[in-house]
Image: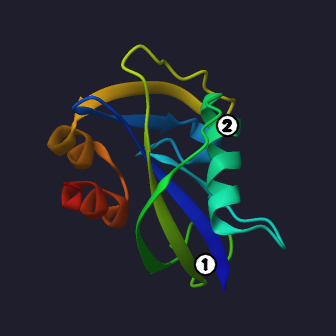
Amino acid sequence: MTREVLIHVRRGDEFLVTHRTPDGGGYWHTIAGGVEPGEEWHAAALRELREETGLTAGELDPIGEFTYVRESWEAEPGGHVDVHAFLAVVDPRWEPALNDEHDEYRWLPRNEAATLLFWPEPAALLRSLP
C-alpha cells in the first residue's frame, strides 16, 4: 500500500487550493505527496509543504485519514493509497512560492475551495473542518 500525506492550508477564513500542471494531471488540489521509506507521517507533511509552497512550518494538526484506490490513468492503477491529512494555519500575509508541480493557486472560502477540488476525499475532509 502506498502512503501519502495531504495538507489543507488555512489563512484566516480561506483555504489554499493549487492547480497541478498539465504534466501532473491539470486539476485543482491541495498540498499532497508521497511518504518516503522510513519517513514519519508528520515529517512527510512538513517536507511536502516546504517543497510545494516554500512554507517552513513547525506544527501541523492531524485532521483525518482515508484510503482510496488509484484511478486507471494514475501510476499503479487499482493500487490502494493510505492518506494521513493535516491542517496548517498560516499568517494572514503569507503567500506560497509554488514549485514546478503547480502553475496557479487561489485562496478561497471553505465551500468554494471544496467545490473546486478534483478529488472527493480532500473536499469532504475540508468541508468537515470546524
SS under mark 2: helix
SS under mark 1: loop
Q: Residue 74 at x, y = what percent?
A: 60, 66
Q: Are marks 1 and 2 in contact (CB under 8 Å)?
A: no
Specify the quadrant that holds the N terminus. bottom right
Q: From this viewpoint, is residue 76 visible?
A: yes
The numbered mark, 1 or 2, whose residue comes first in the sequence reads: 2
- Vertical comparison of 69 with 29: above or below: below
In the image, which disc is placed on residue 128? none
Q: From this viewpoint, is residue 74 visible?
A: no
Q: Residue at x 65, y 33 (%)?
A: 56
Q: Residue at x 60, y 78 (%)?
A: 77
| Extreme residue toward the front, this view | 58
In the image, which disc is placed on residue 50? 2
Q: Residues within 10 Å of mark 1 (few under 14, many from 20)?
A: few
Going by the numbered disc 2, the residue's amino acid type is Arg
Q: Residue 33 at x, y = what percent?
A: 63, 56
Asked whether, in this view, residue 80 is left or right of residue 37, the answer is left
Task: Choose top left, top right, bottom left or bottom right for residue 51.
Answer: top right
Q: Residue at x 26, y 40 (%)?
A: 113
- According to the image, label 1 marks what residue? 77
Q: Residue 39 at x, y = what percent?
A: 78, 67
Q: Residue at x 57, y 62 (%)?
A: 5
- Foreground label between 1 and 2: 2
| Extreme residue toward the right, this view | 38
**How far apart are the two marked residues, 1 and 2, measured between alpha carbons?**
28 Å
